Amino acid sequence: VLGYVATDKNGAFTFVWTAEITGELSLRVRWEGSREFKEAVSNEVSIRVKEERKCFIATATYGSELSPEVSFLRGFRDNIVKKTFLGSCFMEGFNAIYYSFSPHIASIIEENAILRNLMKVLLYPLILSLKVSAGAFFAVNPYIGTEAAVVLAGFVASSLIGALYMLPIVLLAIYITRRRPLTGISISLNNILKALTVLLLLSLFAMATASYIQNVAMAICSSLLFVSASALASPAILLRLLRDVDIRNIRSKNS
């Protein structure tokens, strides 16, 4: 017996049960009857119970000053991005990757206040980047259409995320491993920028083609490639600018 229910005056009842296990389940509710009504058994219902997919971003920011920002971005994602073809395809591919590790991180930081606060601090650049990308969407949407505006928002978000998160790591790696002026990476950096430019153009063309023929698999792959190339290109461009500044400083000292 899972529980007891009370019937209304017509003998009808509602039974609510929360599953505590995952997998394929078959349920049937039985009422033993009363003086007024006969015993009753419901039809069998089959359900699939999946493990809750915890979002570590929501876990880290829950109840904090970032919580309203996360709620706004969630609404932007659900009500705008996922309503477009390319946006929904990207989210399908992204979620497959994100939720492969997010629940594990969420479980760890949920029980540790120090880790949760540290994660919240690390998420500030991400939230800022996504908020700026949403602003870019609303600025251009009336002029270029929702589908193209979502692509632009994705470019803005991934570029900012790449610049804010990856550039410090790249600079630190260069300092530790080379300890020489930024001019030393000019040749390889130029090749990287050329390759990333080609990837961006190819992924844009593939996204446009996928949108035209409504090919989901092609849209998922091309949108993930586009976002990845954008995230890598922004720190590479910043490094190129720093290299140019470094060269000018060296020339000014020698003149």
Image: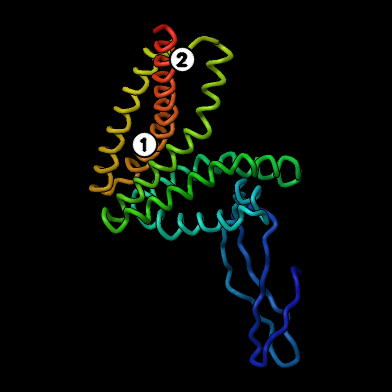
- Residue 23 in sight from this viewpoint: no
Which residue does the image show at 39% across and 14% down from the upper left?
Answer: 186
Element type where label 1 sits in the image: helix
- Residue 147 coordinates in the image, percent (x, y): 31, 52
Which residue does the image show at 32% across and 29% down from the upper left?
Answer: 199
Name which residue type carries label 2: Leu
Few, some or many C-alpha atoms within 10 Å of disc 1 (few <14, some 14-19, many ≥20)?
Answer: many
Q: Which residue is mark 1?
A: 226
Nearer the N terminus, badge 2 or badge 1?
2
- Residue 187 coordinates in the image, percent (x, y): 37, 12
Element type where label 2 sits in the image: helix
Where's the C terminus, which quadrant? top left
- Residue 110 in sight from this viewpoint: yes
Observer-side mark, 2 or 1, equals 2
Q: Which residue is mark 2?
A: 182
Q: Nearer the viewer, residue 137 or 14?
A: 137
Which residue does the image show at 35% across and 27% down from the upper left?
Answer: 196
- Residue 40 coordinates in the image, percent (x, y): 65, 80
- Residue 41 coordinates in the image, percent (x, y): 64, 76
Name which residue type carries label 1: Phe
Q: Which mark is residue 197?
A: none
Where's the N terminus, which quadrant? bottom right
> Which quarter of the picture shows residue 234?
top left
Q: Nearer the viewer, residue 205 or 171?
A: 171
Give the Cα separation between the discs numbered 2 and 1.
27 Å
Vertical relation: 91 (above or below) 250: below
> Which quarter of the picture shows residue 2?
bottom right
Q: Residue furthest top?
A: 254
Few, some or many C-alpha atoms within 10 Å of disc 2 (few <14, some 14-19, many ≥20)?
Answer: some
The answer to whether residue 135 is left or right of residue 103 is left
